[in-house]
Image (spheres, helix red, strand yellow):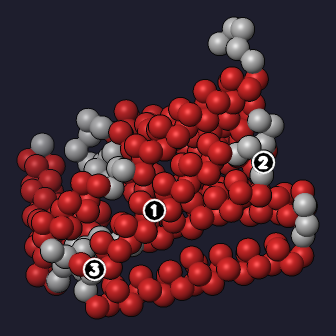
C-alpha cells in the first residue's frame, strides 16, 4: 500500500467492498433454487430478505445525500434490486399465511418506517445535518443487523453444532466488514466505519466458534425441532423420539461402565 494516495485507497477498499458484498448478496441463490424446485417457500423465512432490503434502502438514501459516494450507490442499488427479486420469488411460492406475514413486514418496515424516516429527515433537517441524521440512523440499524447472529451463536454454544452457522458466510461477511471499515476510515465517515468494526469482531468470533465446534457432533435435536415446527406434529414427534432413544442408550452405556 506504500505510495498510494488516500483517494486511491478509498477507491481500492470501496471496490473490494463492492465485489465482496456482491458475492454476499448472491449467497441466497441456492436457497431460492431449492424453493423453485420444490415450488414452495414453506419452511423458509422472509425476514432476512426484508431486513437486507431495508438496510440497502437506508444506505442508498444516505449515499445519495453524500457527495461522490458512487461506490455506495452502486452496491446498494444492486442490493435493492436483488432483494426485491428474492422477496418476489418468496412471495410467489409462499403459502397464504406467509404471504400475509411478508406483506405486513414490507408495509411496516420498507414502506412505513422508511417513509417516515425519509419524510422526517427531509422536513426536520437541512444540508449536512440531514446527512448526519440519516447516517446515525443507518449506523444504528446496521449495528442491530450485525448483532442479529448472536442468536445463532447462542444456539451453537447450546447445541455444540455449527449446522446453522456456515463458515463461508461468516468468512465473507467478516471480509466485507473489513473492506467497508477501511473504506469508511479513509473517507473519514464514522457512520460507515463504526458498524463494520462490530461486524468484523462478531465475524471473527463466529469463525473462532466454528473452528472450536466444527468437529463436535453435538446435540442437534433442539435445532431440528425449531426447524421442523412448521412441518407438522409427526415430524416433530419423530425428532423427539430420536432424542429420547439417544438418551436411553446413553443411560444404558453409563450404567454398564
Label drawn at residue 67? 2
> Quick one: SS at disc 3?
helix
* Image quarter hosting the C terminus: top left
| Residue at the spot of label 1 | 81
User: How far across and down, in percent of the image, does residue 234 sit?
Assistant: 11, 81
Q: For residue 167, which quarter of the picture?
A: top left
* Residue 229 in the figure: left or right of residue 4: left
Q: CA distance from mark 2 to mark 1?
A: 22 Å
Is residue 117 visible to us here? yes
167 left or right, relative to 111: left
The answer to which image quadrant residue 252 occupies is bottom left
Tell me which numbered mark, 3 or 1, is placed earlier along the sequence: 1
Q: Residues within 10 Å of mark 1 (few under 14, many from 20)?
A: few
Q: Residue at x 43, y 68 (%)?
A: 84
Q: Position of residue 135 (x, y in %)?
A: 77, 57
Q: Is residue 162 left or right of residue 239?
A: right
Amino acid at each position: 500500500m506504500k505510495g498510494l494516495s488516500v483517494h486511491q485507497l478509498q477507491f481500492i477498499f470501496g471496490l473490494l467492498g463492492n465485489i465482496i458484498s456482491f458475492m454476499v448478496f448472491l449467497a441466497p441463490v441456492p436457497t431460492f433454487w431449492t424453493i423453485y424446485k420444490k415450488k414452495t417457500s414453506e419452511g423458509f423465512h422472509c425476514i432476512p430478505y426484508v431486513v437486507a432490503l431495508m438496510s440497502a434502502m437506508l444506505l442508498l438514501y444516505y449515499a445519495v445525500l453524500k457527495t461522490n459516494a458512487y461506490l455506495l450507490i452502486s452496491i446498494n442499488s444492486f442490493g435493492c434490486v436483488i432483494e426485491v427479486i428474492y422477496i418476489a420469488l418468496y412471495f410467489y411460492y409462499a403459502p397464504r399465511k406467509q404471504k400475509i406475514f411478508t406483506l405486513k413486514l414490507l408495509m411496516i418496515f420498507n414502506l412505513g418506517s422508511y417513509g417516515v424516516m425519509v419524510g422526517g429527515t427531509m422536513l426536520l433537517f437541512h444540508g449536512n445535518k440531514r446527512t448526519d441524521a440519516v447516517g446515525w440512523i443507518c449506523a444504528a440499524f446496521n449495528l442491530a443487523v450485525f448483532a442479529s447472529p448472536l442468536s445463532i451463536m447462542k444456539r451453537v454454544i447450546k447445541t455444540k453444532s455449527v449446522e446453522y452457522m456456515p463458515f463461508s458466510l461468516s468468512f465473507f461477511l467478516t471480509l466485507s466488514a473489513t473492506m467497508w471499515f477501511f473504506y469508511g476510515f479513509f473517507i473519514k465517515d464514522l457512520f460507515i466505519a463504526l458498524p463494520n468494526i462490530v461486524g468484523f469482531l462478531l465475524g471473527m468470533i463466529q469463525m473462532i466458534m466454528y473452528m472450536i465446534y466444527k468437529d463436535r457432533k453435538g446435540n442437534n435435536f433442539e435445532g431440528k425441532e425449531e426447524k421442523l415446527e412448521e412441518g407438522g406434529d409427526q415430524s416433530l414427534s419423530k425428532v423427539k423420539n430420536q432424542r429420547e432413544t439417544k438418551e436411553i442408550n446413553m443411560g444404558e452405556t453409563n450404567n454398564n461402565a
